[in-house]
Image: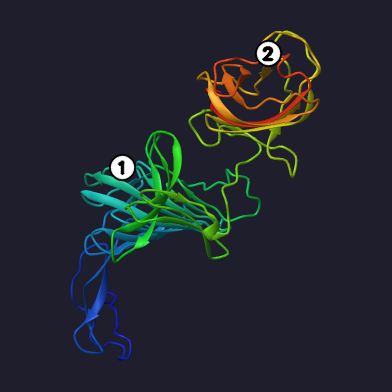
Amino acid sequence: MGAPELIVPGTAAGGPPVGGSGTANTIPRWTGTTPSTTLEDSALVQSGTNAIGFGTPKTWGTNFTLNAIQLSESASLSADINTTYLAANQYFDSPGFSNNRIKANFAARYLQNGATGDHSFQVAPFGAADSVISWTTAMTILNGGNVGIGTASPTDSGGWSAGRILDVRSPSAGTSAVLYVGDSGRATNTQLGFYGSGYGFVGTVTNHPFRVLQNNQLRGEWTTTSLDISSTFGYGLKLPATPGNTNPNTLDAYEDGGTAGSGGKTWTIADSSGAGLALAVASCQYIQIGKLVTICVDVTFPVTASGANASLTLPIGATVNWHAGTVSFQSVGGGGLAELTVMCNGAEIAFYAGTTSARQTNANLSNKRIIFAITYFTSQ
């Protein structure tokens, strides 16, 4: 009996045998005319026990149920029991159970996790051929729709229940993370981000205005010279009831919040002359914005013969002495005064006759109603 022969399909038994030669582990192909009787090497090579590749692929190692196709010298498609991988310059090395570079270059891959429905994009720096890859997650899309840039776990740190999150992280501690939205036709970008030194920001990269819209209507505009939140837009500048910053140089270092319809916050105005006078207070209110304080007072002195200099308390101490204010004087019991000047002197309110330096005593203001407003500076 002769040696067994491979018979070409479609030919009679005993027909021409298959001829040709090939390279070990290379998947053959029929060549010549149909029906062909000759096999030769194809471009496909079996690499290891569970991978094929084109050209001269790397030897892929066994990783449980990993199967792979190396598409070129630097691209591969592989899958295990749960995940599909599309990679550039990466293969799996069985002895070290590691992801290695096919050649000296950068590496990148996309992962689609069938168990969780998540998607991940990973990158790696330049490295030598066959060197072990250490992946860094560039972007993640979770099955719920949350997107993370620079993080594999985009989280809802703001507590927005059942919301959609775009979580952008810097590559390392102390570096910045910025989202740019702009016009591709010119260098105009709006930026939203976090600066590495520890603060968040929003604005424009160039000197173009930054606008705030509500209901698609302009409500405010920042330019290189001004912040405009005016009646032109139908809105004014509203300060919250509780200051968020105690720095007196900032706009939100203020005290306001009197009851609805009032002009500001009230305080207990009192006699500070040492005479222990019981004042009749119709109203006393103040508002502070930064270092600037404005007070409005309507008070009546009792009948008194005290010769002590008339003195009333301030809600917030003045930093510079002798701020002058305006006074409206009304006599209650007759014997009115011609004119008064009110001054803030450190922690007290003092009164002078007209524009002179003659300070008024309690007796001078006995049974007199005095209405005045004054603005002064404070360090508080």
Residue 114 in sight in this render: no
Q: Residue 132 got which mark?
A: 1
Which corner quadrant holds the N terminus?
bottom left
Q: Residue at x 36, y 49 (%)?
A: 224
Q: Residue at x 32, y 47 (%)?
A: 124
Q: Is residue 357 left or right of residue 241?
A: left
Q: Does residue 239 sit above or below 52 in this rendering?
A: above
Q: Amino acid at mark 1?
A: Val
Q: Amino acid at mark 2?
A: Thr
Q: Residue at x 68, y 18 (%)?
A: 312
Q: Does residue 6 sit above or below 220 in this rendering?
A: below
Which corner quadrant holds the C terminus?
top right
| Residue 235 image offset from top left, x and y in percent | 58, 55
Residue 225 in sight in this render: yes
Q: Is residue 350 left or right of residue 147?
A: right
Q: Considering the numbered disc 1 on the image, is that residue within a helix, a strand or a loop?
A: loop
Q: Residue 361 got which mark?
A: 2
